[in-house]
Amino acid sequence: MRPVIPYVTAALLFGLGVYGVLRRRNAVLVLMAVELMLNAVNLILVTADTTVRAQLPHGGQVFALFVIVLAAAEIGVGLAIVLQLYRLRASVAVDEVPLTEDPTPAVAGAVGSPATGERKAS
Amino acid sequence: MTGVDVLLLALGAVAVGSAVLVVSTRHLVRAGLYLVVCLGALAGLYLVLTAELVAWVQVLIYVGAVVVLLLFAVMLTRAPIGASDDLDRPGWPAALIGGGTGLGLAALLVDTYRWTAVDLPEPGSAERIGEQIFGSWVLPFEVLSVLLLSALVGAIVLSRPDIGRRDATGDDERAAR
């Protein structure tokens, strides 16, 4: 087994994930690119487990399992935030999210009630 | 080049190719489906790398749960069916940083490992991984269960608007500030 093949695959996947996070406007697509990065890290961990003889056997695979669990938790909370953003703004474009405290609410066509949106956006 | 190398190359090419499509397609739903292909190819890579348990957990959690959640989010945010033109920002900085990261890491790893070969270890079956998790890694395992619980509670609190509603006085104080 040539370890350079999965290592290079993982490096390219990580680069593609970085590209996707920076390129995409839709928050759901940004989360998909984050998943690509997490999977690249998992592939590095599993490959290192086969190439490096550690004192504790299979440490890399155990860590890969832990990263998968962390990714599941991350995607749950991340999608809850994205859906809340959609309820407030009726849009999931990440470059339209106001970073400063904006007193004027933008709730045109939002799913939630206007009072809720006003409260959350203020 | 042994059979293992050929398998690794083929599955790696599938994974990278579908990842390119995930970050470049103009159809939101297709991005999710290409992600399934990418994650499935990665599960195949894990199998070839003798990580059986990780491969099946990958299929269960990523292909089974995470992608379904993502597709649900695509539906709930009323994503348009068909191609949409407003998915991307201008791409030069992203291409520069992403390409630099990926190719830089790849060059580093190629320089480190060259074309050396290693023997595959004994497969990481459920029995061996379970021994390790419940023997050497019990504390992180238990901490992860607490983290999953807190993520569950956090997601519920975030998605229910009637939890954590401020009263009128709190709003007045914020307005006065």
Image (cartoon, rainbow, N blue to C red):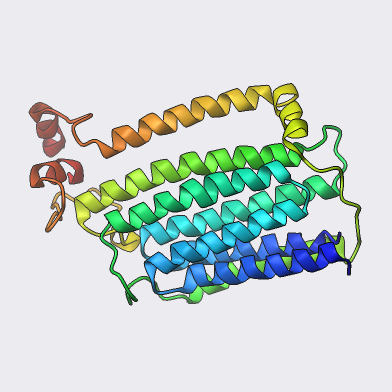
- Compared across the picture, whether B96 is left or right of B136 comes to left
Q: Is residue B100 visible?
A: no
- Tell me which corner region of the image, top left, top right, bottom left or bottom right, holds residue B5: bottom right
How many discs appear? 0
Q: Between residue B123 and residue B133, name the one nearer to us.
A: B123
Where residue A73 sits in the image (x, y, percent)? 47, 39
Q: Between residue A83 and residue A25, name the one nearer to us.
A: A83
Where residue B26 sits in the image (x, y, percent)? 40, 74
Q: Looking at the image, is B172 positioned above or below residue B66?
A: above
Q: Looking at the image, is A44 positioned above or below residue A60?
A: below
- Tell me which corner region of the image, top left, top right, bottom left or bottom right, holds residue B157: top left
- Compared across the picture, whether B71 is left or right of A35 comes to left
Q: Between residue B176 and residue A76, name the one nearer to us.
A: A76
Which residue is depicted at the point 9% across and 33% down?
B172
Q: Quadrant of the N terminus of chain B?
A: bottom right
Q: Looking at the image, is B50 positioned above or below residue A20?
A: above
Q: Looking at the image, is B137 positioned above or below residue A89?
A: above
Which residue is depicted at the point 65% across and 51% down?
A41
- Tell me which corner region of the image, top left, top right, bottom left or bottom right, holds residue B124: top right
Q: Quadrant of the C terminus of chain B?
A: top left
Where residue B80 sits in the image (x, y, percent)? 28, 68
Q: Is residue B91 visible?
A: yes
- Compared across the picture, whether A76 is left or right of B172 comes to right
Which residue is depicted at the point 87% across and 50% down?
B120
- Compared across the picture, whether A57 is left or right of A80 comes to right
